[in-house]
Amino acid sequence: MKPFLILAALCSTLNAADPAPLAKATAEMADAANAFLKSLNEEQTKKARFPFDSDERENFQFVPKERQGIPFADLTPEQKNLSRKLLASGMSEKGLLKVETIIALEGLLAEMEKNPTFRDNKKYYTTIFGDPAADTTWGWRFEGHHLSVNFTLIAGKTISATPSFLGANPGEVRGETLKGTRPLAAEEDLARTLATALHEASKPVVYTAKPPDEILTGSDRKIKQLEPVGILASDMTPAQQEGLLKLIAEYANRHRADVAAADMAKIKADLPNIRFGWAGGLKKDEAYYYRIQGKSFLIEAANVQNNANHIHTVWRDAEGDFGRDALGDHHRHHDHDH
């Protein structure tokens, strides 16, 4: 894993405060995307680039399969490094570490399952949609088994970072290689701590003893809000609300600080209306599912498969996945200007 980790250092330079944070973010992502594209030959470019309005842009998947885009397998070490720099331009240092640990686990699964063609840590694909520039509308994706990172940048003003899917199998490594590794430890531990505190305070956070087998929204391109379960933040104590915000921030802070701050500001403004619900057991190693939903967003996590040692987590935006809401606003303003 060491070669991956040197890139984490890149992130720290991206997270400095800035008076126009999203302008800085869009410029840095565009620079990283263009450096990557410039390194590709003609044949590679055909794989890596799609028009912005391509149907492929919303083809969000997290299972092991062939994808559109250019895989690590087709890149030179220098090009791989430029792909990771693009990833580092969108993720926080913590988020990048989660991503790289998930990729490392894919290599471990190949050894464990003796099936390196199905479990292949070179099948992580970089795809660019449209023409990257600081003030244009374009997008990029980094995707493979248990990973789907999607950024949509609208006219240099708005950045959508959803759908954001991270999964891990094993959820906790129990063999000798990478023993004890848990890429999504905080997503699990913060949620269980909160659910346990609420349950012990006799609040109806556990809405069913049997968890669903999987996140309910799957790889739906557009999500509908799920039925309200669990309890409202307005029924929590200040300490419990703080625990909820800390858990939500774990998802937001996958992404670079300026993007995460914009998302968290929206969420804090709607805090009383946010619900947290848990299904399944509250003890470690028991199968569980939880979801957090507000007006604008949905977080789901499921750890049921492989004896509750295989975790899927996703953060979705009810209106704005793939930048939909901002794209609608942008087109309306644009039409009005003309």
Image: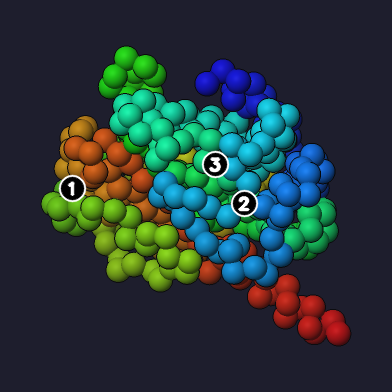
Instruction: Inspect this view and state whether residue 136 appears.
Output: yes
Which residue, as the protein is rendered here, is positioned at the far top?
Answer: 176
Disc 1 or disc 3, which is closer to the eye? 3
Label disc, if present, on residue 124 of the rendered structure: 3
Label 2 or label 1, whichever comes before in sequence order: 2
Q: Earlier in the sequence, mark 3 or mark 2?
A: 2
For residue 280, the mark is 1
Please state the horizontal and vertical placement of residue 17, each as a whole percent of the image: 74, 38
Is residue 34 positioned above or below 109 on the image? below
Left or right relative to 14: residue 107: left
Which amino acid type is shown beneath numbered disc 1?
A: Gly
Q: Position of residue 239 (x, y in %)?
A: 37, 41
Q: Secondary structure at mark 2?
A: loop
Residue 72 at x, y = what percent?
60, 37
Q: Is residue 201 left or right of residue 268?
A: left
Q: Residue at x 82, y 43 (%)?
A: 38
Question: In 3D space, how far apart are the residues under numbered discs 3 and 2 (Cα atoms)?
Answer: 9 Å
Left or right relative to 177: residue 90: right
The residue located at (20%, 52%) in the rendering is 211
The answer to which of marks 1 and 3 sits earlier in the sequence is 3
Pick the residue in front: 152 or 131: 131
Whether residue 252 is visible: no
Q: Is residue 167 above or below residue 116?
A: below
